[in-house]
Amino acid sequence: MPVILCNGLEHYYEQRGHGPAVIFIHGAFGDCRLWQPQWEHFASGYRLIRYDLRGHGKTGASQQTQYRMETYADDLAALMDGLGIESAVLCGLSWGGSIAQVFAVRYPQRARALILAGATVSMSLTWNEKLLRYVLVPRRLMLWTIRSLGVEHFVRFSFWLAGLTLGRGWLHGEPRTLHLMRDCMLQIEAKEYEKIWDAIYHFDLQPLETIRCPTLVVVGEGDARMVRRHAEEIVKRVPGAQRRLLPAASHALTLEQPQAFNQAVDEFLASLMPR
């Protein structure tokens, strides 16, 4: 199993192809399998890297007691150092797109371009989100819920909560996508859930105006209204950012509409560096 030491923890990673580096960052509670359609499509012409985030998948748990978004950005920087990559195109799905934003702010010279798919900019951009964060689902309540339920029951609770707060069409109900997400989530240890959730909870708006690299924001037409609102915020704040809306796609747009997503990314990358 290919692993590399990043920021004090051995991370599972895969790479293939040659050319400009493109690094795929999966979303919270997923793993690098969420990028399979892109892994096959972009192998010709680019050096592709995908990896399992700290606490997730084959990377798994660490001894660190607390995670923050900066932790994940620093892990990514260490991964690039270990692989000899000075700068890369970062393609992040959902929370992976949030990590990419933090990285681009923290390491501006190392982000060649950003592709943000279904990404959010904060846990509390709108008043409704502030209500969820501080009143309805506060940090202490969520941590208590994780400890009380255990992993299997918390996974079920998570899908119920997502449907309640984001809408039942959030993952489009596509059986293969739902099965993969459940499989990813069941591999995560309970203590890691607490640390990952804590990192998500403390995610606040970054100074996106400082990002100067080319940025593509991709969002599914059927994604939660909150996520579509966040996509608009990224485009408003990041200079020159482009937005693509994918029909018949919700939050897991890389799996639900891989051809449309890949085409949008192909066109964006071709504008930066012809294959």
Image (cartoon, helix red, strand yellow):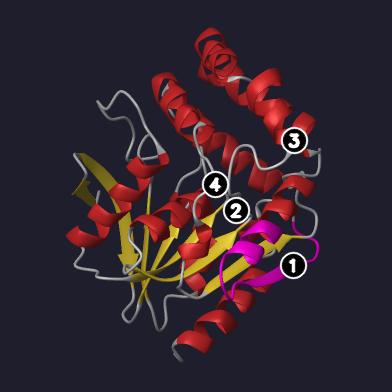
Q: Which residue is mark 4?
A: 205
Examine the image and state in which quarter residue 154 appears.
top right
Task: Give the number of the mark in front: 2 or 4.
Answer: 4
| Mark 1 residue element | strand
Which of pointers 3 and 4 lies earlier in the amino acid sequence? 3
In the image, residue 5 sits, relative to residue 258, either above or below, namely above
Image spot of residue 53 (x, y percent): 38, 44
Q: Is residue 31 left or right of residue 175?
A: left
Which of pointers 4 and 1 lies earlier in the amino acid sequence? 4
Which of pointers 1 and 3 lies earlier in the amino acid sequence? 3
Task: Give the number of the mark in front: 1 or 3.
Answer: 3
Gap in Å between the C-alphas at discs 3 and 2? 18 Å
Task: Give the number of the mark in front: 4 or 1.
Answer: 4
Looking at numbered disc 2 in the image, what kind of residue is underneath it? Answer: Ala
Q: Which residue is mark 1?
A: 245
Magenta region, residue range: 232-249
Q: Is residue 127 magenta?
A: no
Residue at point 75% right, 44% down? 170
Residue at point 75% right, 51% down? 223
Q: Is residue 217 left or right of residue 9?
A: right
Q: Residues within 10 Å of mark 2 (few under 14, many from 20)?
A: many
Q: Which residue is mark 2?
A: 119
In the image, residue 74 sits, relative to residue 144, either above or below, namely below
Q: Residues within 10 Å of mark 1 (few under 14, many from 20)?
A: some
Image spot of residue 89 (x, y percent): 41, 70
In the image, residue 125 sits, relative to residue 210, either above or below, namely above
Gap in Å between the C-alphas at discs 4 and 1? 22 Å
Q: Which residue is mark 3?
A: 127
Gap in Å between the C-alphas at discs 1 and 3? 24 Å
| Mark 2 residue element | loop
